[in-house]
Image (cartoon, helix red, strand yellow):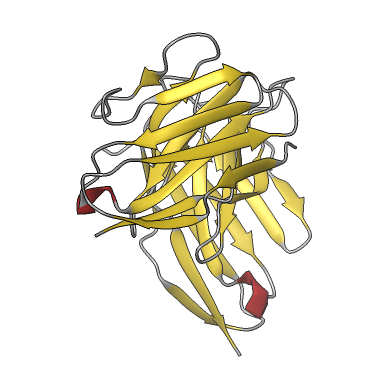
Amino acid sequence: RKEVEQDPGPFNVPEGATVAFNCTYSNSASQSFFWYRQDCRKEPKLLMSVYSSGNEDGRFTAQLNRASQYISLLIRDSKLSDSATYLCALGGGSQGNLIFGKGTKLSVKP
Amino acid sequence: SAVISQKPSRDICQRGTSLTIQCQVDSQVTMMFWYRQQPGQSLTLIATANQGSEATYESGFVIDKFPISRPNLTFSTLTVSNMSPEDSSIYLCSVDPGQGATEAFFGQGTRLTVV
């Protein structure tokens, strides 16, 4: 099992739709979890951290399920500007680094 | 968060040559990392740049191919040596600001094309 696996995508959704991404991980000892957003030809930027109790930031909700070893990102009321690739990341790399998934591409259409 | 300046932003290089990428941070940081992101792939850690000592490389990456310098807590360079087309990729420096933060912040990336 790969360290981090994400939904393959791409996700093509209309404006206003709700879309959810999942990311499964293999290292049960991981303590920190994140969602990053990467626009085309840009660097990844932190979208939000994922806390055990779940957390919300506007239209974005992140959840962690330790028992099943996955994290999720829910985007409500999708905007055109949400079109990007969403990367999940978790702590626990051998050098204190983050381990990233391949990313899921989201395309929001008018 | 930390402000990270990475340059060059892009380059097209001849095979067999070398390119040095610079990463400057606006504050002192403990951890600086270099990643590679090949088309359609995830970010892969190349190495951790250690201040005052040799970089720590991940499996599959070696110092002769990717020499790294870290002369102080705000600056690092990555050199891609003796390049081949397979080295065409995006190279990203990343920092963990420390002070309890565990998320990573990235430079703008260097898009390298080897011809």
Q: Which residue: 58% across, 22% down?
A: B31
Q: Which residue: 72% across, 46% down?
A: A55
Q: Which residue is outermost to the bottom? A: A110
Does A105 appear above or below B70?
A: below
Q: Can you say which quadrant of the picture contains the N terminus of chain B?
A: top right
Q: Position of residue B39 (x, y in %)?
A: 33, 59
Q: Nearer the viewer, residue B41 or A82?
A: B41
Residue A29 seen by the camera: no
Does A33 appear above or below A28?
A: below
Q: Can you say which quadrant of the picture contains the C terminus of chain B?
A: bottom left
Left or right position of B32 against A52: left
Left or right position of B12 against B4: left
Q: Which residue is outermost to the top? A: B53
Q: Which residue is outermost to the right? A: A58
Give the number of callouts.
Answer: 0
Q: Which residue: 46% across, 66% down?
A: A105
Q: Position of residue B29 (x, y in %)?
A: 67, 23
